[in-house]
């Protein structure tokens, strides 16, 4: 029975790319543990930033800070999500060692 490759190309571009050439990609053949760790790093950083913001007082903040913060949170969260999708696809095709 032929196996179906869930990724037509080895390198999948991340959705947070804003250029036509997609310079940042995920190697879909990388070690799944490495992909999962990269996802966890980004999601953890996003969560930590949100926790810090939750505890802050914005009286002295600048209105320009809001788009900077939301952009950083978007990049971290979207990249983490893209990495988790690749890890999930790899696990769906995963076979237990005999």
Image (cartoon, rainbow, N blue to C red):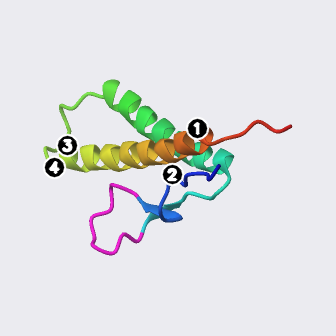
Verify CB contact (< 8 Å) between mark 3 and mark 4: yes
- Between the C-alphas of marks 3 and 2, the distance is 38 Å
> Badge 1 local density, few (<14 within 10 Å), some, or many (20+)?
few
Quarter holding the C terminus is: top right
The foreground one among 70 and 4 is 4
Q: Residues within 10 Å of mark 3 (few under 14, many from 20)?
A: few
Give the image location of residue 72, x and y in percent.
Answer: 33, 49
Residue 41 appears anywhere in the view: no
Report x, y in % for residue 48. Answer: 45, 34
Asked where in the image residue 49 lies, by quadrant, the reply is top left
Q: Which residue is mark 3?
A: 66
Q: Nearer the viewer, mark 3 or mark 2?
A: 2
As measured in the structure, the alpha-carbon distance from the residue carrying label 2 to the one carrying label 4 is 41 Å
> Which structural element holds mark 3?
helix
Answer with left or right where residue 25 lies relative to residue 59.
right
Circle 1 is placed at which residue position?
92
Q: Label 4: which residue?
A: 64
Magenta stretch bounds = 14-23
Residue 82 percent location from the top left of the image: 43, 47
Residue, x 39% and y 31% (percent of image)? 52
**Going by the picture, which residue comes out furthest to the bottom?**
21
Real-space CA distance between mark 1 and mark 2, rounded to the nearest whole angstrom? 9 Å
């Amino acid at each position: 029975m032929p196996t179906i490759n869930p990724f037509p190309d080895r390198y999948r571009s991340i959705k947070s790319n804003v250029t036509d050439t997609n310079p940042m990609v995920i190697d879909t053949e990388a070690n799944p543990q490495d992909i999962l760790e990269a996802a966890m790093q980004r999601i953890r950083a996003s969560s930590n930033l949100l926790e810090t913001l939750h505890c802050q007082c914005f009286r002295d903040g600048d209105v320009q800070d809001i788009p900077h913060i939301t952009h950083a949170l978007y990049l971290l969260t979207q990249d983490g999500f893209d990495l988790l999708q690749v890890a999930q696809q790899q696990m769906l095709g995963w076979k237990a060692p005999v």
